[in-house]
Image: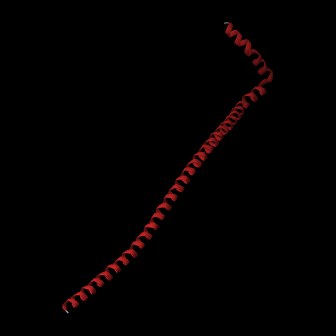
Amino acid sequence: MSDMSAAVSAALPLLEALFSLGVPGILLVLASIPALVIAVIFVLDYKHGKRVSKVLEAYREDTQESLRVMTEKFETSLREMNKKHDEVAEYYRKNVTLVKNYERMTDALQTLVVNNTRAVEHLSTIVETRSKM
């Protein structure tokens, strides 16, 4: 019973304050409860919006950092591939020059072989005519 009497004695000042307001005051307090609930909802929504905004900002920063790192890696690999491509292109140009030089050399060797063959034929003709004489 002591708990009950303590609760009644604690609620007694509240009840006296309500009776001192009268019927219009009590109605006004009751009418202000939904407005208070709406105000609390607005405050909670505002705080939630702030938290969401902070989370989105952190996410944006992380995403931008990841994008920057990926861009740097991509540019590095692109530069390496470009360097290797330039090396391969230089090898190709050198091979083309080498093939052209070999073609000129084979043409010169072919001309030399043809001239030597003609000279040997001419010498054999000379030897044959002298041996008949």
Identify which residue, 60 or 95, lies in the foreground: 95
Q: Is residue 94 left or right of residue 123?
A: right
Q: Residue furthest right?
A: 20
- In the image, taking residue 30 as reference, residue 86 lies left or right, namely left
Left or right of residue 47, residue 63 in this image: left
**Residue 127 drawn above or below residue 38:** below
Task: Tell me: residue 97, above or below residue 49.
Answer: below
The C terminus lies in quadrant: bottom left
Residue 18, above or below 77: above
Residue depicted at 76% across the width and 29% down the height: 28
Residue 66 x, y percent position in the rendering: 57, 46
Q: Position of residue 68 (x, y in %)?
A: 59, 49
In percent of width and height, residue 19 lies at: 78, 20
Which one is nearer the viewer's eye here, 121 or 48?
Answer: 121
In this view, the residue in front, 48 or 130, is 130
The quadrant of the picture occupied by the N terminus is top right
Classify residue 89 as left or right of residue 75. Answer: left
How did the renderer colour the structure?
secondary structure
Who's the residue at 35% across and 76% down the image? 109
In the current view of this chain or complex, which residue is farthest to the bottom?
133
Residue 120 lies in what quarter of the image?
A: bottom left
The outermost residue toward the left is: 132
